[in-house]
Amino acid sequence: MDCVIREARRSDLRDIYLIELKSFPYPYSLEAFTGLLILFPKLFLVAVCEGRIAGYITGSITDSGEGHIMSIAVHPQYRGRGVGSALLEAIEEVYRSLGVKRVFLEVSTTNREAMGLYRKFNYRLQGTKSNYYPDGSDAYVMAKEL
């Protein structure tokens, strides 16, 4: 698939939010995405495929200098075509360029597809966060040394 990965723009936020709504039972708000774009513009990337936003990834850098992948999602129409892999690869490159040595993320303990993607990229299970999601379900913490 011919996709371009680029930094997100304010004009992309509506499409990003619609992908978020289709992807998660407890989506981030449009305001949260706006804040992430303002605070970490280099760590907010989109995949543009066939002229439309097919997916996004957004992250931050913690006070201790670690990368935190906040959210990644691909529009249902584009899943299974390597878009998520391309986004993950791209944000890891940005983290490396910023001198980040370790990246972590949280993933639902029931999201096997996402865990498979992270394992493919050598993310390793670090622990569990109990009651992480609003419904009381747990998340795994996965991390990778860059």
Image (tube, rainbow, N blue to C red):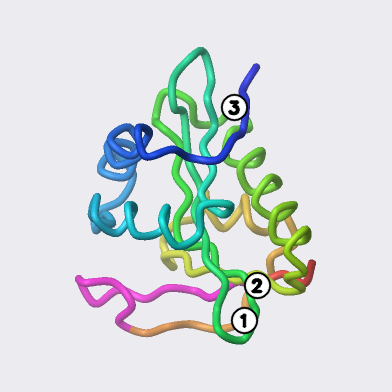
Q: Nearer the viewer, residue 140 or 6?
A: 6
Q: Main secondary structure of the magenta part?
A: loop
Tag on residue 143? 2
Q: Tell me the distance, in whole angstroms, between the alpha carbons under discs 2 and 3.
A: 24 Å
Q: Classify residue 104 by image quadrant.
A: bottom right
Of the two numbered discs 3 and 1 on the same chain, state the one appearing first in sequence. 3
Which span of residues is magenta-colored?
A: 131-143
Q: Secondary structure at mark 2?
A: strand
Label 3 sits on what residue type?
Arg
Residue in view at x 56 percent, y 31 percent: 80
Q: Tell me the distance, in whole angstroms, between the alpha carbons under discs 2 and 1.
A: 7 Å
Q: Residue pushed farthest top?
A: 50
Q: Classify residue 108 by image quadrant.
A: bottom left
Residue at the disc numbered 3: 81
Task: From this view, report whether residue 37 is shown above or below residue 67.
Answer: above
Where residue 81 appears, as percent x and y from the top left, is 59, 27
Q: Is the residue under label 1 in contact with that under label 2 (CB below 8 Å)?
A: yes
Q: Secondary structure at mark 3?
A: loop
Magenta segment includes 110: no
Q: Tell me the distance, in whole angstroms, between the alpha carbons under discs 3 and 1.
A: 28 Å
Task: From this view, report whether residue 142 is shown above or below residue 32.
Answer: below
Q: Secondary structure at mark 1?
A: strand
Where residue 118 appears, as percent x and y from the top left, is 63, 57
Q: Quadrant of the C terminus?
A: bottom right
Residue at the disc numbered 1: 126
Task: From this view, report whether residue 65 is shown above or below residue 2.
Answer: below
Label 1 sits on what residue type?
Gln
Magenta segment includes 138: yes
Where residue 30 appears, as percent x and y from the top left, is 24, 50
